[in-house]
């Protein structure tokens, strides 16, 4: 369901030139930082992350197709990298997806019970699950923490600038923070800046 102030669902979503530029910039940075073919996977992840963020900001939704593409690309990367132990690696990636998506689903249910509204959409839960194949166990909580801190800071600064109060029922496109956090965490992880 679109958030307040967002366009009606029947209004076509059109990417602007700067949206394409942001996707290309994320892809180019990924390829510049990581060797091929890993850089190509990171480029696709970066472009998807930017696309998800743009759509979530505009519509307060995360397209299932984008989340599914992220999940499938992540599983393809796992299968490509772990040729000898492919089955075990895919099972582990699946467990990471279930654990991350499950954790956000429980958070969603707890917030609903506390505030009486959905604090996270199911798109956010599915996006968190799609992070599973991309990130190792120690990096998954890092990505969620980066997204949460960025969302809190952005919400606080926005409220201060607009002279508003922050409240429990305030809408926030969390996917707009989570998707880029997944991509950035993947880059950091693969550059060996985070222990895995």
Image (cartoon, helix red, strand yellow):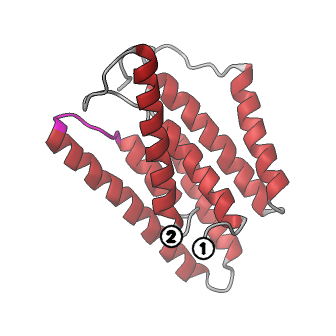
Query: Disc 2 on helix, strand or loop?
Result: loop
Q: Are marks 2 and 1 in contact (CB under 8 Å)?
A: yes
Q: Residue at x 25, y 29 (%)?
A: 169
Q: Would you say 94 lies left or right of 52 here?
A: left
Q: Would you say 26 lies left or right of 179 here?
A: right
Residue beneath disc 1: 195
Which percent across, then down, holds residue 127?
A: 47, 48
Instruction: Report if residue 67 is visible in the image.
Output: yes
- Tell me: residue 67, above or below residue 5: below
Looking at the picture, tell me which residue is in the foreground, 87 or 194. Answer: 194
Q: Characterize the magenta stretch by its predominant secondary structure.
A: loop
Quarter-wise, where is residue 18 in the image?
top right
Which percent across, then down, holds residue 31?
A: 82, 52
Q: Residue at x 59, y 64 (%)?
A: 75
Task: For the N terminus, give its image quadrant.
Answer: top left
What is the span of residues highlighted in magenta in the rendered image?
A: 115-121
Dot 1, crowdedness within 10 Å: few (<14), some or many (≥20)? few
């Amino acid at each position: 369901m679109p958030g307040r102030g967002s366009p009606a669902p029947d209004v076509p979503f059109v990417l602007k030139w700067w949206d394409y530029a942001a996707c290309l910039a994320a892809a180019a940075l990924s390829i510049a930082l990581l060797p091929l073919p890993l850089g190509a996977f990171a480029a696709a992840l970066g472009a998807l992350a930017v696309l998800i963020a743009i759509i979530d900001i505009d519509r307060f939704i995360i397209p299932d197709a984008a989340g599914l593409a992220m999940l499938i690309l992540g599983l393809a990367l796992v299968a490509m990298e772990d040729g000898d132990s492919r089955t075990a690696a895919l099972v582990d990636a699946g467990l990471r997806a279930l654990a991350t998506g499950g954790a956000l689903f429980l958070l969603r249910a707890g917030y609903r019970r506390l505030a009486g509204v959905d604090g996270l959409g199911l798109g956010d839960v599915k996006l968190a699950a799609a992070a599973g194949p991309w990130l190792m166990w120690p990096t998954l909580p890092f990505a969620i923490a980066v997204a949460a801190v960025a969302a809190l800071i952005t919400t606080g600064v926005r409220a201060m600038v607009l002279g508003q109060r922050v409240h429990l029922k305030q809408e926030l496109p969390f996917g707009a923070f989570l998707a880029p956090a997944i991509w950035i965490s993947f880059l950091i992880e693969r550059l060996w800046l985070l222990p895995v």
